[in-house]
Amino acid sequence: MFTRIILSVFLVFVLAGCATGSKKQAAQSQPVARESHFRDYDYDDTLPSESYEKPAKKTYSEPVIQLSSKQIQRALKKAGFYQGPIDGKIGTKTKEAIIKFQKANGLKADGIVGKRTSAELNKYLSR
């Protein structure tokens, strides 16, 4: 009889262990939904991070002035940096004139008419 009680208790523990083990296995085999859940949120303001940098504040800048090659040549001619014909072709003479204009106006002298250079050239077109 004593052996029967011990076997019954042992059987209860074994079955209880199997039941909890199967619950653990079931929990482990189910997919974790948290990963896709976190994609829906923007944590920029709530997650501190050493590598996180806040975006720079937007500052007002002048609108970009798109100048045609003829307008560039015309402005350079009015400014006294270009002597060739206004033909709309950006050749070596026009490039040299752009670089001289940029140097004279404290701009990056790279021969490329970017935002700042076109803004300065535009001043000569309106004269």
Image (cartoon, grey):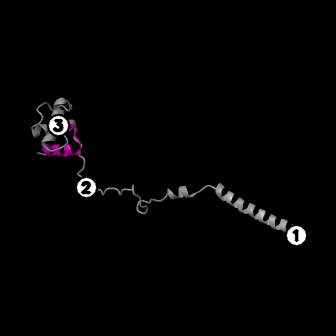
Q: Quick check: is 6 in the magenta stretch?
A: no
Report which residue position mark 2 lands on: 60
Residue at disc 3, secondary structure: helix
As drawn, is 110 to the left or to the right of 11?
left
For mark 2, does the 10 Å Cα neighbourhood hold few (<14), some (14 to 19), or many (20 or more) residues?
few
Which residue is depicted at the point 27% across and 56% down?
59
Q: Which residues are magenta?
A: 109-125
Q: Nearer the viewer, mark 3 or mark 1?
A: 1
Say which label, 3 or 2, has the lower sequence index: 2
Q: Nearer the viewer, mark 3 or mark 2?
A: 3
For mark 1, does the 10 Å Cα neighbourhood hold few (<14), some (14 to 19), or many (20 or more) residues?
few
Q: In this rendering, is residue 82 above or below 25?
A: above
The x, y position of residue 12, in whole percent, is 79, 66
Say which quarter of the image contains residue 29: bottom right
Report which residue position mark 1 lands on: 2
Which residue is depicted at the point 14% across and 44% down?
105
The reply to whether discs 3 and 2 touch (Cβ–Cβ < 8 Å) is no
Give, as a three-letter code, the residue at label 1.
Phe
Closer to the camera in the image, 32 or 121: 32
Instruction: Characterize the magenta stretch by its predominant secondary structure.
Output: helix
